[in-house]
Image (cartoon, rainbow, N blue to C red):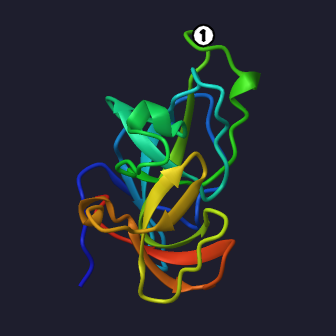
C-alpha cells in the first residue's frame, strides 16, 4: 500500500545537493522508490557549524534546521534529531540575513551516520544525536530521544541506521 502526503513529491533518487532558491514548499515530503522519505527545509547558516552528509540536524524555527547541536539542545547530552543532512553546506560561503539555503533532509528510511569515537554499537541498538555531526549509543533516560537503530556497519566509526520518529 502506498501512502501519499499533502505537498509530497516523488524523487528519482536520494537528494544530494542544496538549493539557493526555494524550489518546493517548506515542509514538503519527498519519497524515493526505495522507500526513503525526505523533508524540504531551510538550512540555518547563522552558525559556524557546517552541514555534512549524514549529520544529524534539528529544528530551530519554522521549517528551519541547524547542524549546531547547541541551537537545538545541550551538546554532549543529546537533543531531538529532526533529520539527517543529505548534502554538505559550507556555511561560511553564505551571509546570514542575505542568503538562504534549502535542502532535503532524510526523515525516514535507512541512512549512514558517523558514530561518536570510542563507542561500539551493534545491530539493533538505538542511537541518539550526541554532538555536532555524530551519534552515540542511547543511554538510560534518553529513550525519548532515539533517532533510530543500527541495521549495519557495526563498529566504532560509521553506522547504517533505520530512522524512526521524525515524520
Q: Which image quadrant: the N terminus?
A: bottom left
Would residue 79 be found to the left or right of residue 44 on screen?
left
Q: Residue at x 64, y 34 (%)?
A: 49
Q: Which image quadrant: the C terminus?
A: bottom left
Would residue 10 be found to the left or right of residue 143 on screen?
right
Q: What element carries label 1?
A: loop
Up-down: is 15 above or below 20?
A: below
- Find residue 59 and report its horizontal and vertical position in percent: 37, 38
Quick check: can you spot residue 35?
no
Would residue 33 be found to the left or right of residue 20 on screen?
left
In this rendered view, identify the residue nearer to me: 105 or 73.
Answer: 73
- Find residue 151 and report its horizontal and vertical position in percent: 50, 86
Q: Residue at x 67, y 64 (%)?
A: 117
Up-down: is 129 above or below 100?
A: below
The quadrant holding residue 3 is bottom left
Give the residue at mark 1: 98
Q: Residue at x 68, y 38 (%)?
A: 89
- Find residue 16 and report its horizontal and vertical position in percent: 66, 55
The quadrant holding residue 112 is bottom right
In this rendered view, identify the residue nearer to me: 16 or 150.
Answer: 150
Up-down: is 125 above or below 51?
A: below
The quadrant holding residue 64 is top left
Would residue 101 be found to the left or right of residue 129 on screen?
right
- Find residue 101 and report its horizontal and vertical position in percent: 58, 30
Amino acid at each position: 500500500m502506498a501512502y501519499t502526503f499533502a505537498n509530497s513529491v516523488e524523487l528519482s533518487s536520494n537528494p544530494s545537493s542544496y538549493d539557493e532558491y526555494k524550489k518546493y514548499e517548506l515542509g514538503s515530503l519527498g519519497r524515493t522508490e526505495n522507500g526513503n522519505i525526505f523533508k524540504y527545509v531551510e538550512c540555518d547558516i547563522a552558525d559556524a557549524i557546517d552541514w555534512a552528509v549524514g549529520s544529524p540536524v534539528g529544528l530551530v524555527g519554522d521549517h528551519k534546521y541547524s547542524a549546531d547541536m547547541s541551537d537545538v539542545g545541550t551538546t554532549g547530552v543529546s537533543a531531538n534529531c529532526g533529520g539527517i543532512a543529505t548534502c554538505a553546506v559550507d556555511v561560511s560561503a553564505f551571509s546570514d540575513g542575505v542568503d538562504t539555503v534549502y535542502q532535503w533532509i532524510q526523515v525516514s528510511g535507512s541512512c549512514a551516520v558517523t558514530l561518536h569515537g570510542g563507542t561500539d554499537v551493534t545491530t539493533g541498538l538505538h542511537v541518539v544525536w550526541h554532538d555536532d555531526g555524530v551519534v552515540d549509543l542511547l543511554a538510560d533516560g534518553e529513550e525519548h530521544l532515539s533517532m533510530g537503530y543500527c541495521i549495519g556497519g557495526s563498529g566504532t566509526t560509521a553506522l547504517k541506521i533505520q530512522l524512526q520518529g521524525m515524520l
